[in-house]
Amino acid sequence: LPILSDFVYACAAVLKGMNWRSLRRRSDEWHRALLIEVDPARDVRWRALLPQLSVGPFEAVELDCGFLLAQEGLEQRHCIGTYVNACSSGASRIFSLRRDGKRVATLELQRRRDADWSMVQIRGKANSPVTDAETLQAAHDVAKAYAECARRTSLSTGPQRHPALKPGAYTTPAYVVHRQDHWTG
């Protein structure tokens, strides 16, 4: 629903006579067009510590730019594309959990006050709750692996200021929604 609300807000004039099915189709087309228009040179990026990780039958892909977040949000029909600010600031990391090449779930890790990382959300398609024990275990394994990798990296490099926090380093691309929606609404 959050992804539809973006379309309705931006294109209210074209809604007359639409049914639910056509509204969803037009919203998906509109969002895909926004993705196509993103200039890769201006996209917001951050460093992925674990670009890809195999966990049993699953593959976890760390989403390391605004384009990938928006694409995940479109494919999974939830608002993860609005998390660019949280990810670029270093507060959150997002993973797409896939099985046999198909997206199964999206998980968010957040940095806690003690600088460790933990999973705070996991959602399936259209914000559906993830209840499958195997998928949940894989998500917890991803969170544990990321926390360990972050711990090792900070020990070897020492504390560093995140590049996105330097003055003038962050410019918001046109497709970013300036609010932090919560998946659980």
Image (spheres, rainbow, N blue to C red):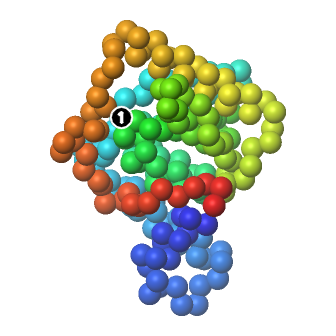
Indicate left or right for 50 with 130 as reference.
left
Q: Is residue 118 visible?
A: yes
Indicate left or right for 157 with 184 as reference.
left
> Residue shown at 53%/47% (left/top)?
72
* Disc 1: CA contacts within 10 A as few (<14), some (14-19) or many (>=20): some
Q: Quadrant of the N terminus?
A: bottom right
Q: Quadrant of the C terminus?
A: bottom right
Which quadrant of the structure image shows residue 177?
bottom left
For label 1, the SS is loop
> Residue shown at 52%/32% (left/top)?
112
Mark 1 sits on what residue?
Answer: 46
List the single residue furthest toward the bottom: 16
Q: Position of residue 3 (x, y in %)?
A: 54, 64
Which quadrant of the structure image shows residue 86?
top left
> Residue shown at 47%/20% (left/top)?
150
**For the image shown, how many numbered marks are present on the structure?**
1
Q: Position of residue 35 (x, y in %)?
A: 40, 55
Q: Tag 1: residue type?
A: Trp
